[in-house]
Image: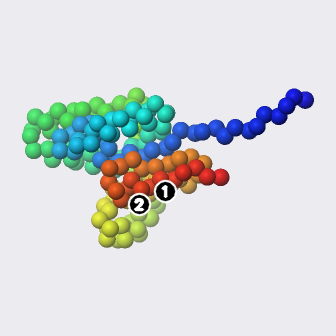
């Protein structure tokens, strides 16, 4: 029998839940792209690290709402088309992120129970849904690094480091 080899800890790529603020910068939406250079730099790092980028449907809908409210019609059309194309790529599995479906009825009921307290902190339903998606990912993957990537301070602090 040969020498024993120490057991190696296999590092799994991080799970990163992408918020609306990040998606708006990636898409370069005017008025919402002030952190684009920083976001694209981090985006490249995460893609290179083979991170599991998860894009919640709430962030998709919220991004679409921001684009629909752009005051210039030509820009609104241009960014709506870019948005459409990027989301279609994700649906087809050709994007660096995976779309996360919205909550089911049970999950929505749980979020509604929490909503009054979150609302008092200025946290809306989309952000609450993102927090709940993070909580579910943490519970499913206790040995993985799971975080929310957001430019909003109340979401950016959600970061589970691997344990166990």
Depth order, front residue of 93/15: 15
Q: Kindly indicate the quadrant of the structure image that contains residue 113.
A: bottom left
In this image, 116 relative to 29: left or right? right
Helix, strand or loop at label 2? It is helix
Q: Is residue 135 visible?
A: yes
Residue lying at 40% horizontally and 41% vertically, measured from the top left: 99
Above-or-below relation of 152 to 67: below
At 51% from the left and 53% from the top, the residue drawn is: 160
* First-in-chain label (2 vs 1): 2
- Where is residue 54, by image quadrant? top left
**Residue bearing the label numbered 1:** 135
Residue indicated by mark 2: 108
- The structure residue drawn at horizontal position 49% and vertical position 33%, both measured from the top left corner, is 50
Q: Say whether marks 2 and 1 touch (CB < 8 Å).
A: no
Residue most toward the right? 1
Mark 2 or 1, closer to the camera: 1
Q: Nearer the viewer, residue 125 or 6?
A: 6
Q: CA distance from mark 2 to mark 1?
A: 14 Å
Snapshot colouring? rainbow
């Amino acid at each position: 029998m040969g020498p024993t080899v120490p057991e190696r800890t296999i590092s799994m790529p991080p799970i990163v839940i992408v918020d609306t603020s990040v998606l708006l910068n990636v898409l370069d939406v005017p008025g919402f792209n002030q952190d684009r250079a920083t976001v694209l730099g981090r985006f490249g790092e995460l893609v290179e690290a083979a991170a599991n980028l998860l894009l919640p449907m709430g962030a998709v809908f919220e991004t679409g709402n921001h684009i629909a409210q752009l005051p210039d019609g030509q820009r609104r059309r241009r960014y709506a088309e870019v948005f459409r194309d990027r989301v279609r790529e994700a649906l087809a599995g050709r994007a660096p992120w995976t779309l996360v479906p919205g909550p089911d009825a049970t999950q929505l009921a749980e979020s509604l129970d929490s909503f009054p307290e979150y609302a008092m902190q200025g946290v809306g339903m989309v952000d609450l849904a993102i927090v709940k998606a993070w909580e579910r990912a943490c519970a499913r993957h206790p040995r993985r690094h799971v975080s929310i990537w957001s430019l909003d301070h109340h979401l950016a602090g959600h970061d589970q480091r691997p344990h166990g």
